[in-house]
Image (cartoon, grey):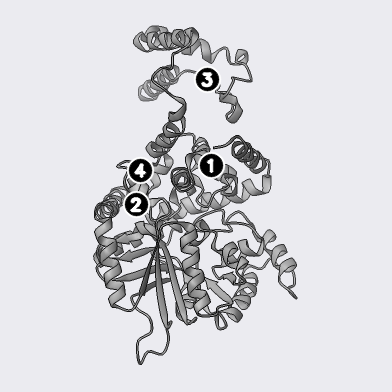
Amino acid sequence: MSQDSRDRFKVRIHEALGDTELRQNFRGAMDFLTGKRAAMFPDADALEKLRTQGASIRKRALAKLPDLLEQLENRCTSQGIRVHWAETADEANRIILGIAQQRKARLMVKGKSMVSEEIDLNHFMALQGIRCLESDMGEYIVQLAEETPSHIIMPAIHKNTAQIARLFHERIPATDYTEDVDALIGIGRKVLRENFASADIGLSGVNFAIAETGTLCLVENEGNGRMCTTVPPVHIALTGIEKVIEKLDDLPPLLTLLTRSATGQAITTYVNMISAPRQPGEKDGPEEVHLILLDNGRSGMFADAELKETLACIRCGACMNHCPVYTRIGGHAYGSTYPGPIGQVLMPRLNGLDKDGNLADACSLNGACGEACPVKIPLPDLIRRVRTDRLAPRTTSTRTQSWLEKQLWRAWLYLYQHPPAYRKLTWLGARTQALIPKRLGLWTKTRSVPLPAAETLHEQMRQHQLRRRESRSE
């Protein structure tokens, strides 16, 4: 990450930490989401079994990825879906533009698609005179505010009701100020409904693409995804190449993990299964369906045995919901399409270590993301890998340690080999907190000063055991 990028990253973090309203919004939202997820998985053993099954399905799909992509293309093509391959974000944008120009399109309505955010589609199309309107309510709110999504599942999670009420009042003509949630939803729906019928193209993402049947699966709660994929005469489905799965039987376990991990629901309101454009005699559906399979750095990750595991992600957002850092700073502080733990691994591979490598520093390595991931992606290990790769160019075999560094490591080794000395040092540290400097070089540039506990763990355990003995004797 360049010095300029690092500086902007630090500025965004400090601004987020200083925004009391933002922190309250995220604290409440994350507590709510993690609570709902926990309620949906009351049996820890059952959850672990389901996670193992989900991880196995995704691992199998990735092991066969090239073959499954060819199978998906052949099956979709035979059913009338036009398949396009895009190696880069620019190529994907130009494919979509070509389709739009063939239809002389001026309005595109979009269902939720993080990949379209990844390629900056809205901005690109606007430069070509084509308007893109987000139809997911959260995405619509973010678009109205001229912002980017702060969460991959709930784009406007950083805003509270009052903020949305002010936004609608200021940006939507003839809209009275109201904080009634149902009224606000009604206002948004009214605007969107007027555009569905007149849209030339509907664009959506893809949650899972099933190679066996050539089926595109989309899950949603608002019905806007179904409107985008059936009302306009053209439907464009945009997805990363990693979203393919092998069989239809693989879908139910993944849907169970996705919906319960993302929003704490047993199942979403709508599960859309698209296998072809409108057929003769059918009353609705698009005349054309296009599937765009985007690489944009994914094949490079696929070629790396360790980073390949990142492609198993089902975009549920659970790693963000359980991340204490994300909870405190929110998604915009990362300045990237994909924030949080998954973004810390994915973005450096999509945009390069120089640009986004420092995102991995926004992590305390507490491990919560790895424990929350429904398909067992080892995110803590992968974040450490990003940190190692970022430092690799500056680390050579000729590097020598300073005298002070050698002595410090020798002292550390001695302490760990001699428990009495270790216990004495921790006892002393617990009683000399006030003497610790408030600045500790590079450590305190992004972290608080680490203060020893008032009592060592050994002391606390001895007191605990003493209390247990006393309670038994009573």
Q: Is residue 221 above or below residue 66?
A: below
C-alpha gap between disc 3 and disc 2: 39 Å
Which mark identifies residue 452? 3
> Nearest the camera: 28 or 222?
222
Residue 326 locus on image (x, y percent): 53, 44
* Pair 1/3: label in front: 1
Q: Which residue is mark 4?
A: 307
| Marks 2 & 4, CB-CB < 8 Å contact | no
Amino acid type, label 2: Ala
Q: Secondary structure at mark 3?
A: loop
Q: Nearer the viewer, mark 3 or mark 2?
A: 2
First of labels 2, 4 by sequence position = 4
* Type of amino acid at the residue the image marks with label 1: Lys
- If you read the primary sequence from the N terminus, does the residue marked by circle 2 or circle 1 appear first? 2
Name the amino acid, label 3: Pro
Q: CA distance from mark 2 to mark 1?
A: 24 Å
Tell me which numbered mark, 1 or 3, is placed earlier along the sequence. Answer: 1
**Label annotation for residue 1:** none
Where is residue 195 shown, x and y percent of the image? 59, 79
Position of 21 relative to 270 (above/below): above
Which label lies toward us, 2 or 4?
Answer: 4
The residue lying at 37 percent from left, 36 percent from top is 381
Which label lies toward us, 2 or 1?
Answer: 1
Which part of the image, by quadrant, shows the N terminus? top right
Which residue is rendered at x = 42% and y = 55% of the image? 315
Graded by Cα atoms within 10 Å as few (under 14), some (14 to 19) or many (20 or more), the crowding at tag 1 reads some
Q: Position of residue 316 (x, y in %)?
A: 43, 55
